[in-house]
Amino acid sequence: MDPLSANLLTIAVPVVAVVGAASLFMVRRKRAGASGGLNRAESWIASLIGAGAMMNALLCALALWGNASWMFTVEPFRVDGLHYSGVTTPESLEGVDHVAAAGYQSVWIDVMGLPDGTRWLFYIEEGLPLAASLTISIVVAWLSFTVVRERPFARAFPIAIGVASIAVMIGGLGSQFAGALARSSVIEYLGADRLVKDNSTAPATESFATFWVSLDLSPVGWAFGLLLVAAAFQIGVRMQKDTEALV
């Protein structure tokens, strides 16, 4: 699993926790006439969700610090995922039946003396999804403990979810573009005039790509989903306010 997918999966866990916490509140509302509030099991579950979110936020913060301490000191710096148009068939596939053609699409390189600007781009690639996960985890922890206190519809909460949705979108899309820019700067640093060839004429030659990004738009879907959750909570805030006014 690539780093972006792994981080999006990390984001998915708190999002599911948000839905679970909201479901707990709805169950409490249905049973309000009988129990008057959360029972002990529901309170424990909501608290565990909040504790898990806080733990995930701590791990994300540690990962951000750990990535920084490693990326700006490691030498040589391994750069993987460099897009490469390789027309040479791998030796292990030569003579294998049913193989019509083969080549290379990516290359990794251990680079010495990589500039700080390029290292920053690689750090942003890894750090943006972690920052988005950190934001979501904080929001989930907040929601979980407000559910325990039976006050989940705080006025600032829809705004917090909206900020989290923006963080998810920026973290997902920004990470991809930062990684593409970082690898492009590596090619420039190593010498684009030697590594990048013109493949518009036949026969094709082996060449690195100056800039390459395979855009994954799933963070946009995550962001829209969270914005919808924020809208639902905004309705809940208004309903809670109206109910308190009647009382």
Image (spheres, rainbow, N blue to C red):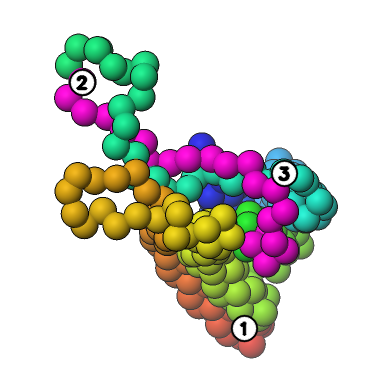
Q: Which quadrant is home to the C terminus? A: bottom right
Nearest the eye: 58 or 119: 119
Q: Which mark is residue 206?
A: none
In reply to whether residue 105 is colored magenta, the answer given is yes
Q: Nearer the viewer, mark 2 or mark 1?
A: 2
Q: Is residue 183 visible?
A: yes
Q: Earlier in the sequence, mark 3 or mark 1?
A: 3
Q: Determine which residue is flagged by label 3.
A: 76
Q: Amino acid at mark 2?
A: Val
| Mark 2 neighbour class, 10 Å CA radius: few under 14, some 14 to 19, many 20 or more | few
In reply to whether residue 153 is colored magenta, the answer given is no
- Classify mark 1: helix, strand or loop: helix
Question: CA separation, marks 3 and 1?
Answer: 59 Å
Rendering coords of residue 177 (x, y %): 49, 64
Q: Amino acid at mark 3?
A: Pro
Q: Nearer the viewer, mark 3 or mark 1?
A: 3
Q: Which residue lies at the image location 58% right of the left edge and 68% below the top edge?
A: 167
Rendering coords of residue 196 (x, y %): 40, 56
In this rendering, would 151 be left or right of 82? right
**Image quadrant where residue 152 sits:** bottom right
Q: Are marks 3 and 1 in contact (CB under 8 Å)?
A: no
Q: Which residue lies at the image location 41% right of the left edge and 50% below the top edge?
A: 208
Q: Residue furthest front?
A: 194
Q: Determine which residue is flagged by label 2.
A: 99
Q: Which residues are magenta?
A: 99-120
- Classify mark 2: helix, strand or loop: loop
Q: Amino acid at mark 1?
A: Lys
| Mark 1 neighbour class, 10 Å CA radius: few under 14, some 14 to 19, many 20 or more | some
Q: Earlier in the sequence, mark 2 or mark 1?
A: 2
Q: Determine which residue is flagged by label 1.
A: 241
